[in-house]
Amino acid sequence: MAEGFVKKDGMKRLSDVAEEYLNDLIGRSLLMVAEQKCNGGAKTCCIHDLLHEFCLHKAQDDQFFYFLKGGYDELLLRVLDLEQIDLGVTIPNEIELLVRLAYFAIRKKFGGIPPSIANLSNLETFIVNGHFGKNISLPGNFWNLQKLKHFCMTGSRFNGGMLPLENLDNSPDLYDLERICRVILPLDCNIMEGLMRKFPNIRIR
């Protein structure tokens, strides 16, 4: 979806079309299910080493690469996965220049996500792999990520992420958000109700 390979099909959600593609690849044994969801669907997948090598060679043969020519405004990068790289407690400032980014995954220690994350106005998937049992807080302008569809906090020894609770009534709602996980919810019922209104189209799966 982030690379733009999945096209809308009638009234179907883009994520449903993508899941059909995924199931078709699994059915053809091009993908192997590594982990299942509680409803039986595929949570994570992998490919055989031989197929991986074939894909790499094919990509090189077809020159399937993007080249940066000029300033950052011409950068075509849509996917950036840094989940296997420990960024410590900071996020490089240069990332905020990748305004066309649709998929962004990072690994981060305790601390917060900087307000500059809101510069990634085309972000659809945001994954934060936290560790060392600490909370990670999100900036108040997190609600400006209007195209966000999937927001997940992960990590085996990670307490969770803290959504911004200030000024909820005057900040934008995330109508496109379908999936959110591993966030710390407030105990106050009134605040909780206001928070849940921020993402009215969450899907229970």
Image (spheres, rainbow, N blue to C red):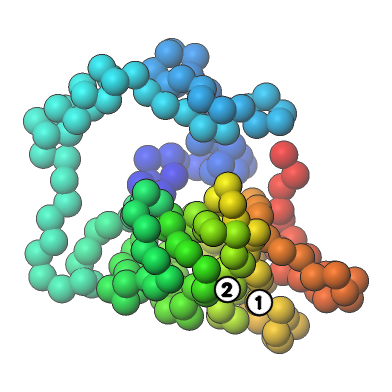
- Single out the residue that lies furthest toward the front: 132
Q: Looking at the rendering, in which quadrant would you find the N terminus?
A: top left
Question: Element type at marker 1?
Answer: loop
Give the image quarter of residue 28.
top left
Q: Image check: 58 left or right of 116?
A: left
**Mark sitting on residue 45:** none
Name the residue rendered at 71%, 64% in the picture: 184
Amino acid type, callout 2: Leu
State the image coordinates of residue 97 (x, y, percent, origin top left).
30, 73
Q: Image check: 43 left or right of 63?
A: right
Which of pointers 1 and 2 lies earlier in the amino acid sequence?
A: 2
Q: Does the CB distance between marks 1 and 2 fall below 8 Å?
A: yes
What residue sits right under mark 2 in the picture? 138
State the image coordinates of residue 178 (x, y, percent, origin top left).
64, 52
State the image coordinates of residue 83 (x, y, percent, origin top left).
40, 51
- Compared to residue 105, the image places residue 48 above or below, namely above
What residue sits right under mark 1 in the picture? 164
Q: Would residue 103 be seen by someone viewing this image from the given angle?
A: no
